Image (cartoon, coloured by chain):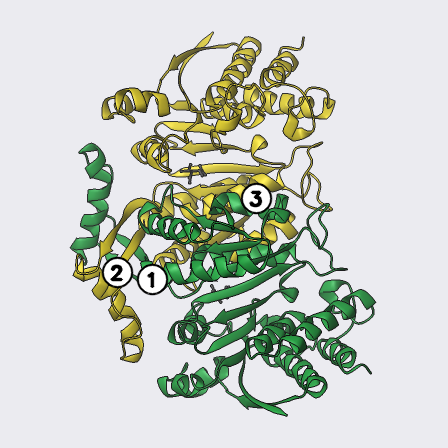
Chain colours: A yellow, B green
Amino acid sequence: MTQYKIPVLPGDGIGPEILAEGRKVIDAAGERFGFDVEWIEYPHGADHYLETGELISEETLKELSGYPAIYLGSIGDPRIAPGVLEKGILLTARFYFDQYINLRPIKLLEGVWTPIKDKTSKDIDFVVVRENTEDFYVGIGGRAKKGESKDLLEVKRTLYSAKFGLDIETDSEEIGYQIGLISKEGTKRVIEYAFDLAEKQKKHVSSVDKANVLSDIYGLWREEFSTVAEKHPGVTTDFNFVDAITMWFVKNPEWFDVVVTPNMFGDIITDLGAMIQGGLGLAPGGNINPNGTSMFEPIHGSAPKYKGLNKVNPIATIWAGAMLIEQLGEKEAADNIVSAIQRNIQDKKVKTYDMGGKSSTSDVGDDIARIIKGE
Amino acid sequence: MTQYKIPVLPGDGIGPEILAEGRKVIDAAGERFGFDVEWIEYPHGADHYLETGELISEETLKELSGYPAIYLGSIGDPRIAPGVLEKGILLTARFYFDQYINLRPIKLLEGVWTPIKDKTSKDIDFVVVRENTEDFYVGIGGRAKKGESKDLLEVKRTLYSAKFGLDIETDSEEIGYQIGLISKEGTKRVIEYAFDLAEKQKKHVSSVDKANVLSDIYGLWREEFSTVAEKHPGVTTDFNFVDAITMWFVKNPEWFDVVVTPNMFGDIITDLGAMIQGGLGLAPGGNINPNGTSMFEPIHGSAPKYKGLNKVNPIATIWAGAMLIEQLGEKEAADNIVSAIQRNIQDKKVKTYDMGGKSSTSDVGDDIARIIKGE
Ligand SMILES: CC(C)[C@H](C(=O)O)[C@@H](O)C(=O)O
Ligand SMILES: CC(C)[C@H](C(=O)O)[C@@H](O)C(=O)O
């Protein structure tokens, strides 16, 4: 019997409830497919932070880096300012483990309601490969009051004036600024991953950028995309401005196979993607470092107002669990979990409120586990 | 008879065709409502650039600044690298004239097909107020090769290492970076505009940001939003992360009244908005400086492959024309143009291919002009 050790970070809000169902389902798959999981629990999240002042320590991160895959619930709590936990735990992990791929399948399972007209599960079936360690997520930025940071105000003045030799704007009382950056290597590796994936699928890669306005950062992205594309003559490609691709997600999702995108635009379009595949309750994601520690999570947040109600949909988390064990090499079990999710949905009996049902979080986990075990 | 002088920049691709219809309709409205327009044509765009090397000169901009409103077709040409014309003409104008409001109505006219299920023109009826002169549109950025720009590579190294005291990334071969900035004053004025608008409508303002990740720049945005909100106790508000709001646009567009957003996110969500209101052929926009020179345009691009075919939908441009004359003070005529557009659509006879019809661009312009003149 293969033995796995999987660290779990249930996190905040509904995190513990949904992750319990994810574990239940993986355990069931283990029973059937001959592997056993030891779950190693980590307390990180809002409560831990409020009690100890610690977000996540380097020691813990080092310890976690000994495992191939982490299972994450959700991070975020209304008692704490937006960003503190998300950056201090979630983004820290993505960066620390160099999980440069954020893999987000956009797949409308059969029997799921989509808000989009005239589209079926045949039409909505693609994958977004979101770069996950660069871009505007690098956390460089600041605020500057008048006089405080001459340099940046200078930048601003220069910008406006350079073009026309006149001062349109005077110094501001205060500015906020943010710097995004991408590297050639960081861009190349994620685009290569996307092309390798497309080679196994429908052989089409769509790039997302806004190179017509943010030309410096995304000019480099386009160049790398073109360079990688040349090495894959059998794969067709297109460039999409991020504004336009939101339209095509809604109007023509069937155009897509693999969509590769810089980090921030990836954040935006995968939420839209989640909606067209039936809502956040159904959208899993994997933060992947193919040679290191990966981390799997539902892409939704911690939904504080549902905390403890045993009400929300655990399918996104269960699906993320399937991606996790696939990463561990348990492809057959992973496929079986996805089939069981599909069966649960098509049976139409055990479903949570967001899918028009009245079942609880744990009912859905039980049902999917039952299907897997063939009971 | 009131006399107006309106500069027109037909621009590239389908620009001249659609703008001809926009002019036709404004002329018709003038006949009926007692004003007369002298159209002053400007040649700027791809051809002019290729012939003369000039995008738009400061002299021309100064001249244009003598008028309250400019009528723009569309800018962009495949012969020229993405961004050159858009930045050199469109964004230059927005910045030069300090058109700090980009007003984009998201309104599903009756009889228009939306890709969204179960929503009618009652549900899709709100306005996006996009900040238009700051954020990541300021055009500050660059590229740096290894060794070339020690400073920025230093920034990158520091960023990764500061958190854990170790070097996760080594120097990159090359990086691309982009800086966004917003000012207190620039943020305040557009948010105030949004609240003033909401006071006249359904008294709700939704803010868009990504303050949980891009905390420096959008932290300032949130602060200003809260400060302005305090002065409008009768207006309800909510904060939306940009990723999440793309979901609500599709799932619950009826929630919105006035949405106020930083520039780049505004670019993205208004294309999505255009799609839910029936497509780019139906989405107008105004770049507004309430005390200076404004500029009205369809929000779509120059659609080069349709150039000269007399095929595309002129309604976005005609609607933008209505916004233009409203800005000039011709409210009744403006409302009448919008009603005439609505009539044309409900008649279902004269419509372009994107709306399932076979009529030409000029047929639609003729029909709307005819309705206005009561012929
Ligand atoms: C919670 C937040 C920091 C995160 C992100 O912006 O990446 C989330 O929206 C996501 O998409 O995983
Ligand atoms: C053409 C482009 C520069 C422009 C923008 O990004 O603002 C367009 O997409 C728009 O929304 O008006």
Is A33 placed left or right of A133 in the picture? right
Question: Is label 1 in contact with label 2 (beta carbons under 8 Å)?
Answer: yes
Are callouts 3 and 1 both on one chain? yes
| Residue A238 visible | no
Residue labelled with disc 1: B185
Say the numbered circle drawn on residue A219.
Answer: none
- Where is residue A195 shown, x and y percent of the image? 48, 45
Is B249 placed left or right of B58 in the picture? right
Is B252 placed left or right of B363 in the picture? left
- Where is residue A307 shown, x and y percent of the image? 50, 22
Q: For the C terminus of chain B, give its image quadrant.
A: bottom right
Q: How far apart are marks 1 and 2 (CA)?
A: 7 Å
Label 3, secondary structure: give it: helix
Are callouts 1 and 2 both on one chain? no
Q: Mark 2 lies on which chain?
A: A
Residue labelled with disc 2: A173
- Where is residue B305 shown, x and y percent of the image? 61, 71
Q: Which chain carries label 3?
A: B
Q: For the N terminus of chain B, give its image quadrant.
A: bottom right
Which amino acid, by three-letter code, is at mark 2?
Answer: Glu
| Relative depth, front residue between A297 and B299 | B299
Quarter where residue A221 is shown: bottom left
- Judge whether A358 appears above or below B58 on screen: above
| Relative depth, front residue between B334 and A191 | B334
Q: Which of marks 3 and 1 is in front?
A: 1
Q: Residues within 10 Å of mark 3 (few under 14, many from 20)?
A: many
Which amino acid, by three-letter code, is at mark 1?
Answer: Glu
Say the numbered circle drawn on residue B247.
Answer: 3
- Judge whether B8 appears above or below A124 on screen: below
